[in-house]
Amino acid sequence: MSLQGKKIIVGISGGIAAYKTLSLIRLLISNGAQVKVICTQNALQFVTVLTIESLSQNNVYYDTFGSRQMATEHVSHADWGDLFIVAPATANIIGKMAHGIADDALSTTLLTFRKHILIAPAMNVNMFENPVLQDNLQLLIKRGTVVLDPEYGFLACGTCGKGRMPEPETLLEAVRNALAGGDTAVMSQTNGILRGKKILVTAGATVENIDPVRYISNHSSGQMGVAIADKFAASGADVTLLLGKAQYKPQNSSVRVVETPTAELMHNAATKEWERTDVAVLAAAVADYRPAEIAASKIKKSGQTLTLQLEKTPDILAALGKSKHKGQTLIGFALETDNEVANAKKKLSEKNADVIVLNSLRDEGAGFNVQTNKVSFITSNSIEALPLKSKNEIANDIVRLVAERVK
Ligand code: CTP
């Protein structure tokens, strides 16, 4: 997405990572955005007014009562901007934002600003993990501020841990995303409700071996399930993805991927994870049957026909439904060709799921190997039929549905 014509306010507070914010300003400008920078006095210990003004092509606002600025500049800045990103955000500015303190140019403008706010905390790991800071972040998240998680690595204080500000390119991506209503927006729309929740997702097709060279599988590409894993990760959840054969891989590096090529392996991994899982979304196309025996060597061609003995695979959804405890949410998928709603309702109750995401192969644009899908959310007392949407949008809808239920 181009940032042409977008008005971005960059807030800089006093941390060493401020030097990286200079690159962010350049990136924003070169992508077509207009940029105004608001600094704390301490930020100017790390970067100079001259550098920022040269890069942003605008005056820097840092002194509420400075001679060259109007006294209401915090209001005009706040009205001007489409998005506000504070990078780096120190523990001090986070504390002020969380508690409504407005005692300088940056905090006063932040309090006046009512659109997208993104913050990129950057500090020493002990400071970051301090419950005071974490509580303040939770307060902000609840109010819709998007917190861009700091990264692990070497910190300026010489220690190693979580606290590094993400690279300017990552921040640029987050800005783009927020303005496009994408992943960053998911995070603010789910208001941090899913932050830290344990989410288990299955995706892709399972592969059931016949002999060393042949197998039974299906056309699932894994796109839907992988998108779901990515969107949950974007909402701040802790995501484990059990992945069968798939043409897609998660984009979000925080998704923990466990390769589970067969129904048996997926079942074993899912039942092991389930106990400490808050929400499971089973989007994998699991084979219902597998060869009763896997031939040790390649089956040679012989008669006119060949009969394979198949046996049932474990039903993962049913297994999780059986041991589901209070507070857990279980979501299954159903791909039906006829009696769609009735079949989906039957699956819902027989497998003790909370929601079945129903898609019908009869709907144009739905099913395997297309970018779109048309689904309905079936619960024990409701049916919500969604229009044809991209799989990414449906993944967003599933995340929002879960956030609603968890709330
Ligand atoms: N599923 C599963 N384990 C299986 C088979 C299916 O966990 N061995 C899950 C799928 O991931 C999906 C849901 O069950 O979430 C429904 O899958 P589907 O194949 O449509 O349902 P089945 O119960 O297998 O019924 P049928 O094939 O007869 O429609």
Image (cartoon, grey):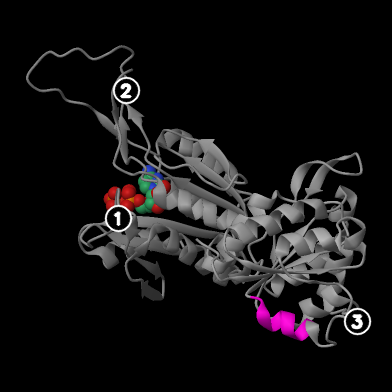
- Closer-to-camera residue (65/278): 65
Identify the element where label 1 is drawn: strand
In front: 132, or 261? 132
Q: Position of residue 305 (x, y in %)?
A: 10, 23
**Disc sitting over residue 335 in the figure:** 1
Q: Is the CB atom of the residue marked by disc 2 within 8 angstroms of ligand 1's nearest atom? A: no
Q: Which residues are magenta?
A: 74-81
Q: Which mark is residue 67?
A: 3
Give the numbered dot on residue 293.
2
Q: Is residue 316 above or below residue 302?
A: below
Kind of residue at disc 1:
Leu
* Amino acid of disc 2: Glu
Q: Residue at x 91, y 39 (%)?
A: 158
Residue 283 appears in view: no
Q: For the residue marked with disc 3, what is the amino acid?
A: Ser
**Residue at far left of view:** 304
Q: Give the spatial CA distance, label 3 vs label 1.
A: 67 Å
Mark on residue 188?
none
Q: CA distance from mark 2 to mark 3?
A: 84 Å
